[in-house]
Amino acid sequence: MTIKIKKVPTHIAIIMDGNGRWATKRGLPRNLGHKEGVNAIERTILACLKYGIKYCTFFAFSTENWKRSKEEIEGIFNLLREYIKKDDNSFIKNKIKLTHIGVIEPFPEDLKKELLQLEKQTKDFDKLIVNLAINYGGRDDITRAVNSLINKGYKIITEKDILNELDTKTMPEPDFVIRTSGEMRLSNFLLYQMAYSELYFPKVYWPDFNEKYFLKALKIYEKRNRRFGGVN
Ligand code: IPE
Ligand code: IPE
Ligand code: MG
């Protein structure tokens, strides 16, 4: 049964945190937490379809996550590779468009190829846009945007100019940012784009996130009063 929500966010952005702690708590290696985290992504995508969310950005790998062990980084890449291969049918079947933000150059060649291929195959779908933030950093995004404007010859820039250069230029700014695991920080996510996003920090570790938590989040968003600096 789908519960009616009067006001759903157009763009949800999720900082999927707590995979490592989820695993450690169970005496498992951290990478098993990431593996379980992929299942939570799949559940969340289905929930987005069910509740009519248009854009969902998943923070999967930050520009700072290179500080982690080689083993953990490779584990994350392997999961990403498996996920793209395994789920290509579900993207196509469900008419989901896949995009990414962040700089993928340093990623393994075959992974990049698979990702870009699936993006190409799904580029005309518009029911739901699943956007993966990989090797993404908010400061890096802003810096690349400004450099791009400099390269184009701009001497003076406006806020709009920056927005139009950011990796998210084709999508609206996130209405709702969810960070699981109870940590209350942004960790260099969509800094420029989050100026007026509603924030929510549920305690649940990402691998345990499911439709129940998703619905709870939607209900919390529904009650928020967005004023954007005005009065109502
Ligand atoms: C988030 O989970 C996933 C990535 C950063 C790739 P963590 O791996 O940060 O999990 P914790 O915070 O250590 O529990
Ligand atoms: C943010 O989580 C990055 C992702 C979820 C991909 P981190 O676990 O890397 O952030 P910090 O280090 O706790 O701030
Ligand atoms: Mg973490």
Image: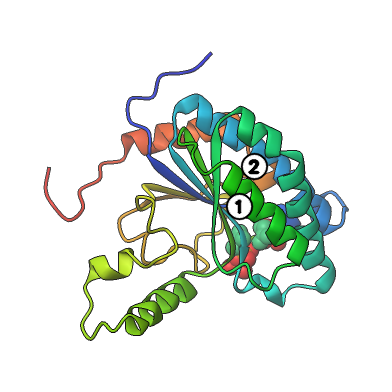
Task: Residue at the far left: name it.
Answer: 231
The answer to whether residue 215 is above or below residue 133 is: above
Q: Residue sitting at 42 percent across and 79 percent down?
A: 143
Which x, y percent locates residue 37?
71, 46
Q: Is mark 1 within 8 Å of ligand 2?
A: yes
SS at mark 1? Answer: loop
Task: Pick whichever, 189 or 124, lies toward us.
Answer: 124
Distance from label 1 to label 2 (Cα)? 9 Å
Is residue 193 left or right of 90 when viewed as pictured? Answer: left
Task: Please state the horizontal and vertical placement of residue 206, each as a whole percent of the image.
Answer: 65, 47
N-terminal label among 1 and 2: 1
Q: Mark 1 sits on what residue? A: 16
Amino acid at the residue labelled 2: Ile
In the displayed structure, would residue 188 be above or below residue 51? below
Please report the residue visible at 36 percent of the width from the left and 66 percent of the height from the top: 192
The kind of secondary structure element at disc 2 is: helix
Label 2 sits on residue: 41
Q: Quadrant of the C terminus?
A: top left
Relative to 186, is 35 above or below? above
